[in-house]
Image (cartoon, rainbow, N blue to C red):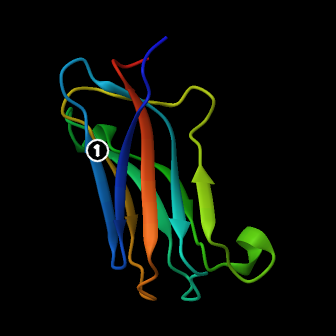
Amino acid sequence: MKKVHISSATGAAAIAHTLTATGRGLHVSRYSVKFGTKPTTTPENITITVDAAAGAAYDQVYDTVDPGSESAAGDGSFTYIYLGPDSKGIDLAPGDVLTVAYVNTDTETYGSSIYHTEGAG
């Protein structure tokens, strides 16, 4: 069984949490964002993207969600977002960069985590 590593970022400004694959690449199993209080600015999406080392033709958006959206949680907004890629996860080749991004107009305190193992697949 491969050891799971967690890349973490915290702050109270825009989120630009990146993870760059090196060596044999990485396998991302899930990612999460937790806010100290509920964001209220909408529309403002958290996006999960991969900037592929192989070139722009291979770049991909994996997830997007508006934490201030009433439709997201039914109560106007929410504080914890668990964004799991599909059951296969995301394989990153060496040089690929996964980014969790959010404008964070409300300057909410956040914690962002990316769970990954060494070696793709």
The quarter in which the C terminus is drawn is top left
Tell me if residue 104 comes above or below residue 3 in the rendering: below
Quadrant of residue 50 within the rendered picture: top left
* SS class, disc 1: strand
Rendered residue at 58%/81% (across/down): 37
Rendered residue at 62%/80% (across/down): 68
Q: Is residue 2 left or right of residue 75?
A: left
Rendered residue at 38%/77% (across/down): 103
- Residue 64: x, y in percent? 53, 60
Q: Is residue 55 left or right of residue 33?
A: left
Q: Is residue 86 left or right of residue 20?
A: right
Q: How many marks?
A: 1
- Residue 77: x, y in percent? 68, 79
Quadrant of residue 67 within the rendered picture: bottom right
Q: Residues within 10 Å of mark 1 (few under 14, many from 20)?
A: many
- Residue 45: x, y in percent? 50, 71
Q: 5 or 94: nearer the eye?
A: 5
Residue sticking out furthest to the right? 74
Tell me if residue 42 comes above or below residue 100 in the rendering: below
What's the residue type where badge 1 is placed?
A: Leu
Rendered residue at 76%/70% (across/down): 73
- Residue 89: x, y in percent? 52, 31
Tell me if residue 18 comes above or below residue 87 in the rendering: below
Tell me if residue 77 comes above or below residue 51 in the rendering: below
Q: Is residue 34 left or right of residue 58?
A: right
Residue position marked by numbered label 1 in the rendering: 19
